[in-house]
Image: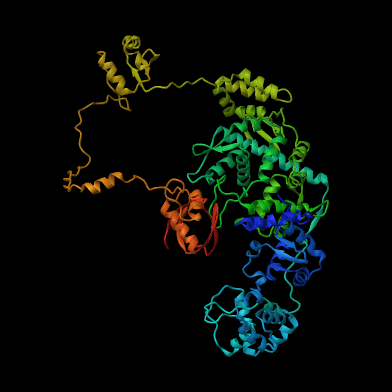
Amino acid sequence: MLDVRPDCACAPDPRTLGELADRLQRPGSVARALPLLPLPCLQVAEALAALGASAPRTELESLLGTESARLDTALRTLSAHALVWPGPDGVLHMATALRDAWETPLGLGPGLDELLSGMTSEELRRIATTLGLTPGTRKRERLDAVLAHHRAPDRLRVLIDSAPPRARDLLERRIRLERTPVMYGSASESPAERWLLDRVLLVGRKWSVEPARVPAEVTRALRGPGWYAPFDPAPPEIPLVSLTASNVEGEAAAAAVSFTGQAGALLGECAARPVAALKSGGVGARELARLGKVVGCDEPVVRLVLETAYATGLMAYEKRALSVTEAYDGWAGQDPADQFTSLLHAWWLLGRTPSGSRDDDGKALPAVGRTSPCTSCLAARHGLVTATAGLSESHGVRDPADLGPLVTWHRPLAHELPQDTTPFACLIREAELLGVLAHGAVSPFGAALLHDDEDLLRTHARRLLPSAASKAHIGADLTAVVMGTPTSRLAALLDSLADREVHGTASVWRFGPSSLRRALDAGRTPAEIQADLSDAADGPLPQPLTYLIADTARKHGRLRLATTACAIHSDDTALLAEIAAHRKLSRLGLRRLAPTVLLCRTPLPTALDALRAEGYAPVAEAEDGAVRLEGAQQARATQLLPRPRQRPRRTAPTPGLALRLLSAPDHEPHPDPGHGIPFQTDAEEILACYAKALNLTDIRQLAHAIHEHEPITVEYLAVSGNRTIRTVSELELDPPLLSAYCHLREDQRVFTLSRIQAVMPV
């Protein structure tokens, strides 16, 4: 990947510029490159687009009102992506696909050269004569004369100042309308408008319904000689505070240790109990709240751990549940530094912002949703670290919220989350939780990510994160404290004998009768428990703990519960002894609990039948101990069944119809260019690959709407799992996405093709 940082001074070999430029002509390539560019590059590109996609560098400098040296960095970055490059004559050229990114760059509209291209030579002669010019004999000469006149700002302002008051007011109104796409009908023949049309201060087409347009040269002249296109070559200044390297490293290490401990506890809980998934995919708010309550952390941390673990391969979906994989066992046995490195590197490459919990409509979003990666989210994350790394050395921001404007400058097209109270608030919080940012400065972890050096990242992690703790401090208050991240063996031992109360930089477990009883129920003996705790403790076991173990073991098992389906009791002990020894009744699972009581593992009706078959005369008891009477009950229907209707007689079909029906396929044929029905258009074939929920009719209807630019209604399955009906227009196919104007939200929206469930006409 090409370096897209503003200070990038490298540029590709000029011989490869043509190849890269051809690549950028493909649909969607420019859309993927633009979110990676800083603000000055986009401002320079828009200014060049306003000049007609090619112009001398001096003209670009004049439009931006800046010196040549201040353009160098932006032009080098654009040239590195083959978006803008200088020609042999010193003229700057722009890729056509980039020029088409703006409909009206700088709000100037089309240039006079473009507007006059369709005029005849006689029309150009009349315009030149009206302007007091000497028209030539050829069309090109007349066009050049008019263009030269209007490209001289001083001469053009004199012409505008000489306009009648009504013509001047009309021109200013049209300029305001140019900034909003309003269609107001064909050009009228009022004297004021005719005066402007004759002097090409307005350019329209005779008998055309398109509105008359104001040339870009006229708009620039009206804005005055002091107007320049916006250009911000330097990032905004924000308040900074002095920091030392030890301050940053200490804060980053504490955050990394806390996150690694929470991740280990959270994934350990997922290993013990898989996370239930929604029918529509992803983990819902209820499961996220449960995990947060069990582990003792906030929802953003839960989302961050699940997303990074899923991206690393530690978790996977299976049978509508998110479960840990075999890779988790290896990860759990690693040193904390290696655990942290794998999760942090996954976050750096993640194509979404994990802590995003709300969509544009304010509805809850599931976590770990299998959605398409978002280039804008990735650009925002890289822009945040790039912006923070560009701060003055040994300085950080006073308030982390101040980093938002810096990210906007470095990645102006990066999307913010709907729930952000300040620009990129959720993203900044994620970076702080992971130790990428500390005290408003980039940490060694962030610097290693920015240089894409995983070995350096692991080196910093092993230097700053302590090794896994294999010993615990067990106090007389019946708590076990582990500083740092415990080893998997120590954590498993303490989890089985105590209840964890605190996760993070330090973990705390508390022993109690219930936790020790849980271990005794699992088959462990008091001697084994004391021996294991003695090996894990950094000193002798406190006396209160040994007393608690002994007391819990003494009470354990004094009451016993046996599984039974019914009980047989009688005052005749000899009779019960006979039944217990009866060979044919052994299948009932009888067990003598007392001389007068037998437990039976067979349900009561079966036991009654078996005893009666062997000649005994038992009776059944009710719940209150009284003898249950068994009277004959007559069955009654709960409701009357309707009388069956006579099937109507049908005439036999004709043999020809029967043969056609039998020979017809029992399913709709699928398009297959090689063997069956061919696709009618390329769009149909693309839609069939991505929109798996649509049938052939829906695919062809949607492809027709895309080709003919017609509105259409779709049934869409949102990421939150809700189904909505949307009427959309201005469809643009960009697999696996569909960009369209949503009439319900009155805004542009991007739809995932795989989530479109049905298509209907408007």
Residue found 20% across the figure and 33% down from its top: 635
Q: Nearer the viewer, residue 402 or 455?
A: 455
Residue found 62% across the figure and 74% down from its top: 179
Residue found 62% across the figure and 22% down from its top: 549
Q: Nearer the viewer, residue 411 or 695?
A: 695
Q: Is residue 537 above or below residue 371?
A: above
In this picture, residue 57 sits left or right of residue 622: right
State the colouring used for the structure image: rainbow
Query: Residue 439, can we see it?
Result: no
Image quadrant in which you'd find residue 259 = top right
In this picture, residue 387 sits left or right of residue 304: right
Query: Residue 121, can we see it?
Result: yes
Looking at the picture, how far across and down is residue 100, in whole percent?
Answer: 63, 65
Q: Is residue 575 above or below residue 415?
A: above
Looking at the picture, how far across and down is residue 599, in whole percent?
Answer: 38, 18
Q: Nearer the viewer, residue 530 or 441?
A: 441
Q: Nearer the viewer, residue 279 or 530?
A: 279
Quadrant occupied by the C terminus: bottom left
In this picture, residue 47 sits left or right of residue 711: right
Image quadrant in which you'd find residue 295 = top right
Looking at the picture, how far across and down is residue 723, in whole percent?
Answer: 46, 53
Looking at the picture, how far across and down is residue 336, in whole percent?
Answer: 71, 35
